[in-house]
Amino acid sequence: MNKRGLVVIVVLWSSYLYGMECSALYIYGKTKIHLTKGSPYDCDGKVNCIIFEKNEQQLLYELFADNWLVGHTQIAPKKTVYIYYKDTNSYFEDDVYNSCYNNLIQKSQENVIEKRLLSMSIEVTEPLIFKSQHSGEYYYYAEKIDKGGNGYPSGRKYFGDEAIEQASNDLVLCYDNVLSAGLRKHGGKKKKSIALPALGTAVDFPREKAALIAVPAILEFIKNNPKGYDRIELLVKKRSEFVLYKELLAAHTVQKK
């Protein structure tokens, strides 16, 4: 065998292994959970609805999100033009809350394209955390409805460990809200499917902790809604995330080869 043939075999074998490594199928109850390293937008036209993070999307605009009501979901108009990222790797990880917002926005705008989505889209205001590169302290701002107040949202800032704790609770709320919103819209369909990103990880939320929140939240929803989704497409950005999600899903589900 010549060197060229050997190179072709190595490339094909590597591609095969990489594809196997970055896609896995699990069964929980009657729901198929397809874990993939990629973007929810790769599922456009293949699922009933796609979830996207409102705060992450609005990092691409001139100003940050004007709606900080965490967990808020909204079905987007069918003809809306969405902006999303070319690169499925997170390029926000080194940015911090005390960096210049304009630099963060400029960085994100270099990695976007526009597309009209075929699947219905649901936007969710996810918790958005920043981490100081100087002190290592986390910062989180969120608006919530004060149940004991007048029913209007009020904002609050959280720092350090409290920021992680509050954002973690809000992340559970986000998963429950978006999965519920999808069922409300497509509950009458015989086959229901949804594409989910790893919510809350747009900037500095620890991805390992986000995984520990996401998997139980999704499985709990399926348990409470056994006749809900036939298929959930769960998309992650990094290979390390993919490995962690595989371990967490394998502990509670049946894996299909």
Image (tube, rainbow, N blue to C red):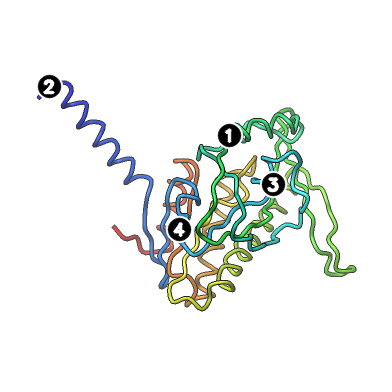
User: Dot 1: what SS?
Assistant: loop
Check residue 91 in the rendering and tell me which mark sits there, or answer none: 1
What whole-number distance in Å separates the C-alpha atoms at marks 3 and 2? Answer: 53 Å
Q: Residue at left 58%, top 59%?
A: 121
What whole-number distance in Å separates the C-alpha atoms at marks 3 and 1? Answer: 15 Å
What whole-number distance in Å separates the C-alpha atoms at marks 4 and 2? Answer: 43 Å
What whole-number distance in Å separates the C-alpha atoms at marks 4 and 1? Answer: 26 Å
Q: Is residue 72 left or right of residue 223?
A: right
Task: Name the spot of residue 156 as percent of width and height, x first.
Answer: 83, 52
> In the picture, which quadrant includes the C terminus?
bottom left
Q: Earlier in the sequence, mark 3 or mark 1?
A: 1
User: Dot 2: what SS?
Assistant: loop
Give the amino acid at mark 3: Leu
Give the amino acid at mark 2: Asn
Residue sitting nearer the eye, 107 or 32: 107
Check residue 128 in the rendering and tell me which mark sits there, or answer none: 3
Task: Name the spot of residue 202 as percent of width and height, x first.
Answer: 62, 43
Give the amino acid at mark 4: Gly
Q: In front of the other: label 4 or label 1?
A: 4
Q: Is residue 69 left or right of residue 196?
A: right
* Residue at the spot of label 2: 2
Q: Earlier in the sequence, mark 3 or mark 2?
A: 2
Q: In front of the other: label 3 or label 2?
A: 2
Q: Is residue 129 left or right of residue 122?
A: right
